[in-house]
Amino acid sequence: MRDRGLIYSALALFLGLVTFPAWHNLSAHVTGKGPEVRLPVNAKQCVAPVEYMRTSHMNLLIDWRETVVRTGRRDFTAAGGKHYNMSLTPTCLEQCHGARKDFCDRCHDYAAVSPPCWNCHQDAKAVLRSAK
Amino acid sequence: MKLYGALIAVAAISLAAGLAGSVGALQPLLGIGVPYCALAILLVGLSWRVIRWSRSPVPFRIPTVCGQQISLPWIKSSRLESPHSTLGVIGRMGLEVLLFRSLFRNTRSRIDQGPRLIYGEAKWLWLGAMAFHWSLLVVVLRHLRFVVEPVPAVALWLDGLDGFFHVGVPVLYVTDIVLIAALLYLLVRRLREPQVRFISLFTDYFALFLLLGIALSGIWMRYFARVDAVAVKQLALSLTVFSPSLPKNLSAWFFVHLGLVCTLAAYLPFSKLMHMGGIFLSPTRNLANNNRMKRHVNPWNYPVKVHTYEEWEDEFREKIEAAGLPVEKH
Ligand code: HEM
């Protein structure tokens, strides 16, 4: 059979598809810099160590939610002894991070996650923030 | 030994990757060197295999068919099971690649009391294979969120579909469960059925354990150990644009996952997993059954010196006639 032209075209197409991320990212000038998250101005310390928050903030939030909804207790004592109200919008957003589009959404768009929390929980107003 | 050898090999690779990944100095090797090498081996090796296949002669049509071939106009032919046109071949290949049609015909035979030989349907293997391959495809496509920025629509769409049930946080993916269940079924089948176990080789177990290891480490990292997905994406993107930089907070579990994936990529061109490309180049499937419609001349024919009967008769005519033997030409 004389099918080599077809075979090589298909192989080239396959190689092109497998290396698509490289072509796409190179032409779109993507870098490994990561999302630009706005940091709070009025606080230096999060409710838990930042390494923990980076990987597991969703677990903490769900812990908070279940504690509040099931036991009614709203007080959270952080490792440093500081007390917080276990609450999504009032504590995380209003007290420190401001509008979610400056903070949560930056990472979530980057990592392609869209938590459904905001279907019910309110956003906060943007507050002055120092760009990272 | 084949079973335990494969299990030990995969465990050793995971352990090595995990240990090396927790040593800061070795992280560049594991996070940058190994992925580039593995991908290069995958692409070069796979191309090499396909190019070698493309050079083998296929002088004659040898499709294995299971339908009526085209013949007289009043005999109904099966266009998909015994295709005579390119369109039919494309349809047949499509069904084979997307739905594993030939595996759907899988049968089992057993000896009943009597003794009587009984053939029956055996669809579980087909179901397990479909479940495994399709969920693997979805998982791989979902991973595009780590290597392409902005995240392509297909990854977002699959992500939403896969997390449809919104169970837990992070949201449970249905394909994760299907993938593990299918792999376990394929493994258990290989171990439980004596005939299949008898013909199983190291490579059969190794591929299964490797895929199980990849899936389990991924699931472990997503739902239990937690890794910094932003850091993973930073590394992945920096690799794709060839200016690699290693983020600081990558956990050892990520390196286990990545190490196993790189092993799979580098191993693929030399293993039975090349059926991924081979299925398209199977002459028993990708050829139209038109041997009786078209003359297929072997393109590698070379001129052969022949001595025909007529020439032979001419050469010995007098002697044949003298001996009183019959001749064709008088
Ligand atoms: C054959 C290739 C691969 C397979 C079969 C595979 C499989 C999996 C599976 C089953 C999971 C569980 C969660 C999910 O389904 O998304 C997972 C998670 C993950 N994989 Fe892979 N993986 C592969 C390649 C890679 C590569 C190349 C990377 C590096 C960029 C990677 C990074 C990750 C990360 C970071 C997670 C955790 C995701 C999260 O926390 O949401 N995987 N993988």
Image (spheres, rainbow, N blue to C red):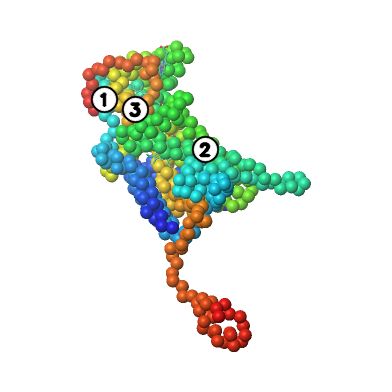
Q: How far apart, in angstroms, are the residues tagged by discs 3 and 1?
A: 13 Å
Q: What element carries label 2?
A: helix
Residue B186 percent location from the top left of the image:
56, 42
Residue at left offset 45%, top offset 48%: B86
Rendering coords of residue A60 (x, y %): 40, 23
Q: Mark 3 lies on which chain?
A: A
Measuring from the top left, give residue B59's x and y in whole percent.
Answer: 47, 60
Q: Quadrant of residue A86?
A: top left
Q: Quadrant of the N terminus of chain A?
A: bottom left
The chain letter under disc 2 is B
Nearer the N terminus, badge 3 or badge 1? 1
- Kindly identify the amino acid type of the residue bearing the numbered disc 1: Arg
Residue of label 3 = A108
On residue A38, the disc is 1
Residue lying farthest to the front in this orientation: B330
Q: Residues within 10 Å of mark 2 (few under 14, many from 20)?
A: some
At x 34% / y 15%, what residue is drawn? Answer: A122
Image quarter where the C terminus of chain A lies is: top left
Q: Give the label on residue B137, or none.
A: none
Where residue B3 appears, as percent x and y from the top left, is: 56, 49
Q: What residue type is labelled 3?
A: His
Residue positioned most to the top? A72
Q: Nearer the viewer, residue B169 or B269?
A: B269
The residue to which callout 2 is attached is: B131
Q: Is B322 displayed left or right of A76 in the figure?
A: right
Q: Is mark 1 on a helix, strand or loop?
A: loop
* Of labels 3 and 1, the one closer to you: 3
Q: Nearer the viewer, mark 1 or mark 2?
A: 2
